Image (cartoon, grey):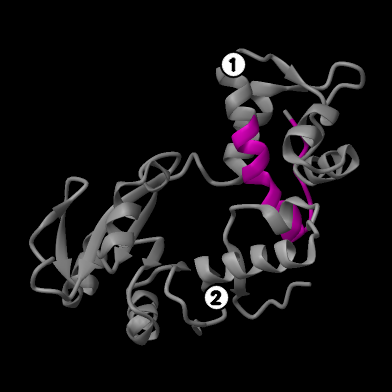
Amino acid sequence: MSPPRAGRIPEASVARLPVYQRILLELVRAGTATVSSEQLAELAHVNASKVRKDLSFLGSFGTRGSGYDTRFLLAHIDRELGLDTDWPVVIVGIGNLGRALARSQGFSSRGFRVSGLFDVSSELVGTEVGGLAVRHLDHLEEAAGLDPPSIGVISTPPSVAQDVADRLVGAGVGSVLNFAPRVLRVPGHVLLRHVDLSIELQVMSFYLSHGDHPGSVAASSPLPHPVGLGAVDLA
């Protein structure tokens, strides 16, 4: 057992934990029993001291000279990421992107459970996607009362995204993942993360135009970038 950690883990370290988790999962599936910080660093494209510092926030795991027990470290990071918990997810906006998200394995495994699909289109309401019936957005609050959602995903047109965010917050979600190309406002207690593919392409075009490369996991990671973390201003 590792000792309990103290204090807040820096956001940059939290953002790298899913990268380590994915690498460790692949190593476990390949039958790799132990992994060194140098190996993890090479696979995650960071330096080894950063790996050791990130993991030190979680406790003491490694053994000098023999590295980390891969399966044990994976299980601990899973717990830290909350992947051993049931997180109901509702998706609002069941167009092409919403349907793709509803069918995505990332939204239906590792602790996440798509519990509701909502739209306002008469052509979509009543249809089935990924084994779930699409309900009208007006039924969001009723559905939330029966199966309270933890995460709300917005894949609507930008013109209605703020209204949807307000309704999700009113339905009790603690986190909002926004795919609509619009900056949203949520109360301080709600975590908001924003995924804008056009911004990602513009960042790529910057580096291509300048013949440069960011050279860091944070800049090149497929992880969503934070727009806000409630009232906390993170550097």
User: Range of the magenta residues?
Assistant: 2-23
Q: What residue is disc 2 on?
A: 189
Residue drawn at (79%, 29%) of the image = 61
Of labels 1 and 2, the one closer to you = 1
116 with respect to 178 (left or right): left
Circle 2: residue type = His
Kindly identify the residue that appears in the image at 43 percent across and 43 percent down.
Answer: 111
Does any portion of residue 219 appear in the rendered image? yes
Q: On screen, 234 above or below 75?
A: below
Query: Residue 19's x, y, as percent?
Result: 65, 42
State yes or no: residue 15 in magenta: yes
Residues marked 1 and 2 touching at CB (< 8 Å): no
Taking the image as shown, residue 11 lies to the left or right of residue 115, namely right
Along the line of sight, the residue nearer the viewer: 214 or 56? 214
Q: Is residue 202 left or right of residue 176?
A: right
**Residue 210: quarter of image:** bottom right
Residue at x-position 61% and y-position 70%: 202
Q: Which residue is mark 1?
A: 30
